[in-house]
Image (spheres, rainbow, N blue to C red):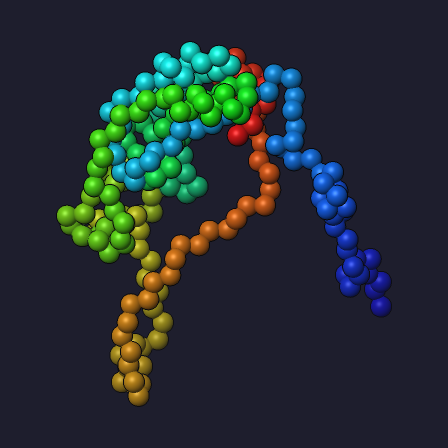
Amino acid sequence: MTTLLNVGRPAGHVEGPEKVTGRARYTADINLPGMLYGKCLRSPYPHARIVSIDTSRARQLPGVVDVITANDIPHILIGRSIHDWPALAHDRVRFIGDKVAAVAAESKEIAEEAIALIDVQYEELPAVFDTFEAMQDDAPLLHEDMASYDGVPQPISPLRNVVSQAFHRHGDIEAGFAQADRIFEHTFTVPAVHQWYLEPQGMRCADRSGWQGQRLAI
């Protein structure tokens, strides 16, 4: 019989003692010379047009290295499968929390203060809150030119505000109904589900303002 080295044997957590004693170091625990802190200004509206952004007061705050908006970076859309999301909102925001501006500063407190000094003027637009209402012909359209996005499934759904549809059929539905003693008709809804990340996240930045080689803690 093959002797197994790991299967069937207890495997202790190598990092366990460090974590339970508080000795483990995470990204937020690291403090290096020249380190910058980043904060993003986010939209308070679910749907609105960005009329203007004034960052002048934030830029004048001592300790602020740079403040950027969508006008300072390439207009590149990102996304996991469909590229429909700008890194910073360009002309309008489409959900509460959509990023509008970003600040890099010498401390977290300065970055937070700078964010509060950015003045954004919005023109609030009708928003979509219900799945079925969003598909009606008179519902606000969140993406006017969805076909232009990279990664959009083909063919695009004819329904308003719907990216794609998937249909799965198996067996003879009519025959099944004919044999059923009772037929129940109802609409079921489930909340959105998303996993929660366990890993810490860190990054390095390099751009025109001279952040090259500096660590940005977000």
Q: Quadrant of residue 73?
A: top left
Q: Is residue 94 visible?
A: no
Give x and y (percent) for residue 141.
21, 42
Q: Which is more toward the observer, 148 or 67? A: 67
Q: Reply above or below: 143 against 2.
A: above
Q: Residue 43 sits in which quadrant?
A: top left
Left or right, 16 with reference to 175 = right
Q: Provide residue 149's location: percent of width, then percent of height.
A: 32, 37
Q: Is residue 159 left or right of residue 169?
A: left
For image coordinates 77% across by 53% down, the residue present is: 12
| 183 vs 147: above or below | below
In the picture, the quarter occupied by the N terminus is: bottom right
Residue at 69% over, 35% down: 25
Relative side of 44 to 132, left or right = right
- Between 52 and 2, the one lying in front of the other is 52
User: Image height check: is 179 above or below 64?
Assistant: below
- 79 or 194, which lies in front? 194
Q: Residue at x 42, y 24 (%)?
A: 115
Q: Is residue 197 above or below residue 77?
A: below
On the image, the x and y values in percent for residue 17 come to 77, 46
Q: Is residue 7 at all visible to an observer of this figure?
A: yes
State the image coordinates of residue 16 (x, y, percent, origin top left). 74, 47
Please count the marks in the image: 0
For this orientation, the residue located farthest to the left is 138
Which residue is drawn at the image coordinates 42% and 11% (left, top)? 60
